[in-house]
Image (tube, rainbow, N blue to C red):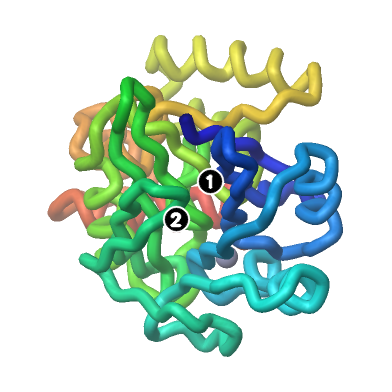
Amino acid sequence: MLQIHPVPAFSDNYLWLLFDEAGDAFVVDPGDAEPVLAFLAAQRLRLAGILITHHHLDHTGGVAALRARLGSIPVFGPANSPFADIDHRLSPGDSIQVLGHTAAVLGVPGHTLDHIAYFIPSRDNQAPILFCGDTLFGAGCGRVFEGDPAMMHASLARLSSLPTGTRVCPAHEYTLSNLRFALAVEPENVELRAREARDRALRAEGIPTVPSLLSVEAATNPFLRCATESVRQAAATHAGRELGGDADVFGVVRAWKDGFR
Ligand code: ZN
Ligand code: FE
């Protein structure tokens, strides 16, 4: 049995811990070492590896301190990453062993050019797990900093093709503000309204809104719904022009969100 737990850090980051009943653990994107060390100590876990999704400091800033404290823990990350402290460099299509499970490395460039995601398929009746960094968020997606909208759209399409029961583990708690935007795009989406009520109640209790399910994202996340008529219509109205393919719709919705307050 693998367990996942989001350790909060900074204002809205989640440092995901993955661990088994033997007490071995992996951490994903440790932007800070202290909260990870505290969780490992409290749960009596041994850190066996570090997974990096992309080079940004809020995802990598704790790596050096973790290794200084715990010894030379293996660090997995993208082959083309500018982050220097990766000793197992991975390319899309690779797979790695994570606590006895095989994790697939997915190429998801767009937010950064080095962005990868880690997917652990279902086994022993456990739902699949996706660590998607800053590519896919609850009801949203990452900003396109280094790639272009078509690239980001293709990356999200890749994630959309995973099993609908996949547990989506993003690196930030942005869900409520993303839902506010999603409702501006699709005010009539009933599932979206239901999700907003549910996630608002969770946040009021201080509970993370993630992991979410890929099926929920498919029904409520506008960035995964560019082929849906309601999203296409809203984007065309916002842009004031006729739109091309789904990647064009994505580009308009992403730019709309960038300016949304
Ligand atoms: Zn980032
Ligand atoms: Fe980030």
Kind of residue at badge 2: Thr
* Residue 219 at x, y percent in the picture: 33, 24
Instruction: Mark 2: give few (<14), some (14-19) or many (20+) Cα within 10 Å.
Output: many
| Identity of the residue drawn at 55% across and 33% down | 3
| Residue 23 appears in the figure | yes
Instruction: Mark 1: give few (<14), some (14-19) or many (20+) Cα within 10 Å.
Output: many
Judging depth in this view, the residue of 247 and 15 nearest the camera is: 15
- Compared to 74, does 208 lie above or below? above
| Residue 237 appears in the figure | no
Whether pointer 1 and pointer 2 mark residues with C-beta atoms closer than 8 Å, the reply is yes
| Identity of the residue drawn at 38% across and 68% down | 110
Residue at the disc numbered 1: 170
Relative side of 227 to 211, left or right: left
Residue at the disc numbered 2: 135
Q: Is mark 2 within 8 Å of ligand 1?
A: no
* Label at residue 220: none
Circle 1 SS class: strand
Rounded to the nearest angstrom, the CA distance separating label 1 from label 2 is 8 Å
Kind of residue at badge 1: Pro
